[in-house]
Amino acid sequence: MTVGEGGCHCGQVRFAVDLPDELKPSRCNCSICAKKGAAMVYVPLAALTITAGEDVLKAYRFNTGVAQHWFCSNCGIHCFHQARSDPHLYAISAATIDGVAVYEDFAEMPVNDGQHHSLDNDGVRSLAGTLKFAPSPDGKWARDGW
């Protein structure tokens, strides 16, 4: 495990997180994940510590109300969520972890089938597909931005 730090876009929310040595993010095609497009890294609840901005974090819940999707109420960035299928874990948005470049670091990423949630599907988890990123051949894409 390594300790990582991260936060929202405006910097009001900051956190520390114990991360596995190898990050293996995934995406999901459920209604909220498809709209936010976040690549998620799962960690135990105890692995995440809010170091600043707890007062600006807001939770969004829908449908069953079990999952809690935490975002900065100032800039709107989704930082992490406690999933309905694994309430003992936080799913950290990989893009909010300092030093992680989601597109370059993870050229291929599994997409979980959240439209057919395991808790509504006899416990069966399935994969919807794999998302792939290929950099532009003109070489304009760089780790530091456009």
Image: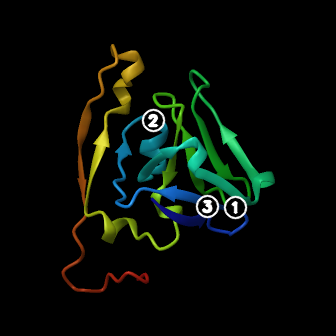
Q: Residue furthest bottom?
A: 139
Residue 126 figure quarter: top left
Dot 1 amino acid type: Val
Between marks 2 and 3 in the image, the one whose residue lies nearer the viewer: 3
Between 136 and 88, the one lying in front of the other is 88
Between marks 1 and 2 in the image, the one whose residue lies nearer the viewer: 1
Q: Position of residue 79 (x, y in %)?
A: 58, 54
Q: CA distance from mark 2 to mark 3?
A: 28 Å
In the displayed structure, 63 sits above or below 10; it is above
Q: Residue at x 61, y 61 (%)?
A: 16
Q: CA distance from mark 3 to mark 1?
A: 11 Å
Q: Residue furthest front?
A: 1
Q: Residue at x 33, y 54 (%)?
A: 24
Q: Residue at x 56, y 57 (%)?
A: 17
Dot 3 amino acid type: Ala
Instruction: Find disc 1 in the rendering and name its residue.
Output: 13
Q: Which of the two labelled residues, at mark 2 and mark 3, occupies the earlier sequence position? A: 3
Q: Residue at x 62, y 64 (%)?
A: 7
